[in-house]
Amino acid sequence: MAYKNALSAYRETRIKTAGQGQLIIMLYDAAIKQLDTALECLQFNTGAKKDPAKIEKTGKSVLKTQEIITELMVSLDMDAGGEIAANLFSLYTWFNRELLEASISQDAKRISEVRGMLDDLRSTWHAAIAKTAASSGREGFAGISLAG
């Protein structure tokens, strides 16, 4: 029990002390992890008789991912971010719609496609944050804007 409390405290501190760029990366990481869980459940839930527990776990993982994507959507500064923010908003909207359909139909291909695109976005954000930090002469993820 003490280990669980320590882990929870560590996670909470990590989130509270993270810069904006780090938070974005953390959101992408969490979304990708949830989709990995959903894909794993779908992989082991094939055949004529589906396991209701696996279906439920898949649905919960997809829903958590949709919540994370919605959080990414509301973090966009549409005024400062201009076309990039608008494009990200459209992409996030498509992700949520695609995940809804994938969850209903238990479609691993659709989930995998969204997962791959999220991973690509995560890599792009990571590179942008690293470049911004390097050009400012600071370590970490300071100086990146949520504007997109």
Image (cartoon, grey):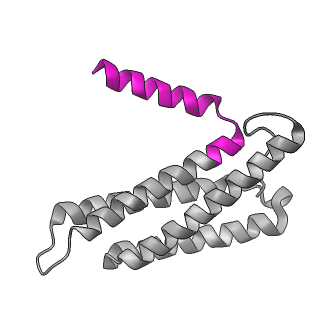
Residue 23 coordinates in the image, percent (x, y): 63, 43
In the displayed structure image, the side of residue 17 where residue 53 appears, left or right: left
In the displayed structure image, the side of residue 69 where residue 59 appears, left or right: left
* Residue 109 visible, this angle: yes
Name the one closer to the observer, 70 or 114. 114
Most extreme residue toward the top is 2
In the displayed structure image, the side of residue 98 where residue 117 appears, left or right: right
In the displayed structure image, the side of residue 25 where residue 51 appears, left or right: left
Residue 77 coordinates in the image, percent (x, y): 77, 55
Total marks placed? 0
- The image shows residue 139, relative to residue 115, as above or below, that is above
Residue at left offset 70%, top offset 42%: 20
Residue range in magenta is 1-24
Most extreme residue toward the right is 136
- The image shows residue 27, relative to residue 108, as above or below, that is above
Q: Is residue 52 magenta?
A: no
- The image shows residue 12, relative to residue 39, as above or below, that is above
Most extreme residue toward the left is 49
Position of the N terminus, as image quadrant, is: top left
Give residue 14's quadrant in the image. top right
Residue at left offset 72%, top offset 56%: 76
Residue 65 coordinates in the image, percent (x, y): 46, 58
Residue 141 coordinates in the image, percent (x, y): 73, 40
Position of the C terminus, as image quadrant, is: bottom right
* Residue 63 visible, this angle: no
Magenta residues, dominant SS class: helix
- The image shows residue 67, relative to residue 6, as above or below, that is below
Give residue 103's quadrant in the image. bottom left
